[in-house]
Image (tube, helix red, strand yellow):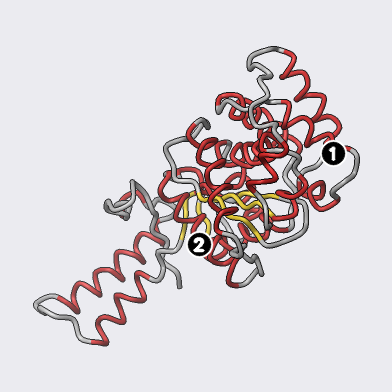
Amino acid sequence: MDIVLYLSGTWGTPMLTPLTQLTKNSFLRRGLYGLLAAVMAITIGLSTPTASQAGIFDLIFQGIRYVQLGNLSDQDEVNLGGQIDRQLKAQAGVRVYNRNSGVNAYINEIGQRLATNSDRPNIPYTFQVVDDDGVNAFATAGGFVYIQTGLIKAAANEAELAGVMAHEIGHITGRHAIGQMRQQALASGVAGALEVRQDALVNIGVQLALQLPNSREAEYDADRRGFNNLGRAGYDTRGFITFMQKLEGGSSAEFLSSHPNPGNRVSNLQSMNSSGTYPNNGVGTDANAYRNRIRGL
């Protein structure tokens, strides 16, 4: 039987909500009090627990594997994203590109420039190049962004690539993955109204990253956030539009499978660009400079 205790507070601070706040039903409270009382009785007067006693404590703390998605701190989200990242690499076949450290450094350079100017600059961001010729990019919770080598090659210049990366950052700043995880967990029956098993949540996060498309609303929101992020970072915002126009022409079925409605999105981006909030300054549009930076990819 799992014991539902809640994670709360910031990383490194006490993580258990007082038992008096467990108000699901009186039976649960009585059961918890009884179990804890039994453990206390066993351990009173003992300075060092024996192996069998340590096992009892292990059984208790193995139950603390639930996450409150409605009250997730930034650090808890980063930790969740890290677990999803490890599973993507260990079990889902995501291969990090490692043949040219200069390319990885370049992508991180662009990403950190965008992250500093994002709506959530206070969390750490991890930008990784995925060794895959498909034209795609995706993001999970907690600042983890993945850019496939095929997309880097498909971009004509740095502004186009930065536009896609800013869009993925927009999913993170909008906490779209967290919302999708909660909906999927509820739909699949692995969650209550507020809490989700952590292991189940990680599996859902992997599935969302690789298989399930974002909603239309999430795509529009990430476009808006990404467009503004791109402009604040000093890039020519037309780069985002020109890359989306390529997708509208059907150049990447893989990208469209997880990023729907390119036609309407291009129109929305053009409308935002026509407002003149950010100057079309040509920053990041030098194709030759871009090709030199990704040479050898």
Label ID, residue 246: 1
Local packing at callout 1 (Cα closer than 10 Å; few below 14, some 14-19, many 20+) is some
Position of 3 compared to 53: left or right?
A: right
Mark 1 lies on a secondary structure that is helix
Near-viewer residue (15 or 129):
129
Mark 2 lies on a secondary structure that is helix
Judge whether 251 appears above or below 216 on screen.
Answer: below
For the C terminus, which image quadrant?
bottom right
Q: Earlier in the sequence, mark 1 or mark 2?
A: 2
Near-viewer residue (234 or 49):
234
Kind of residue sitting beneath label 1: Lys
Judge whether 82 appears above or below 193 on screen.
Answer: below
For the N terminus, which image quadrant?
bottom left
Near-viewer residue (268 or 177):
268
Label ID, residue 83: 2
Q: Position of residue 142 (x, y in %)?
A: 50, 48
Local packing at callout 2 (Cα closer than 10 Å; few below 14, some 14-19, many 20+) is some
Q: Quadrant of residue 170?
A: top right
Residue depicted at x 34% and y 63%: 30
Q: Position of residue 82 (x, y in %)?
A: 49, 58
Judge whether 249 appears above or below 102 on screen.
Answer: above
Judge whether 22 appears above or below 71 on screen.
Answer: below
Q: Position of residue 214 (x, y in %)?
A: 72, 45
Position of 252 compared to 179: left or right?
A: right
Residue depicted at x 70% and y 45%: 291
Kind of residue sitting beneath label 2: Gln
Q: Quadrant of residue 228?
A: top right
| Label 1 to label 2: alpha-carbon separation | 34 Å
Q: Position of residue 229 (x, y in %)?
A: 58, 29
Label ID, residue 156: none
Residue depicted at x 44% and y 63%: 65
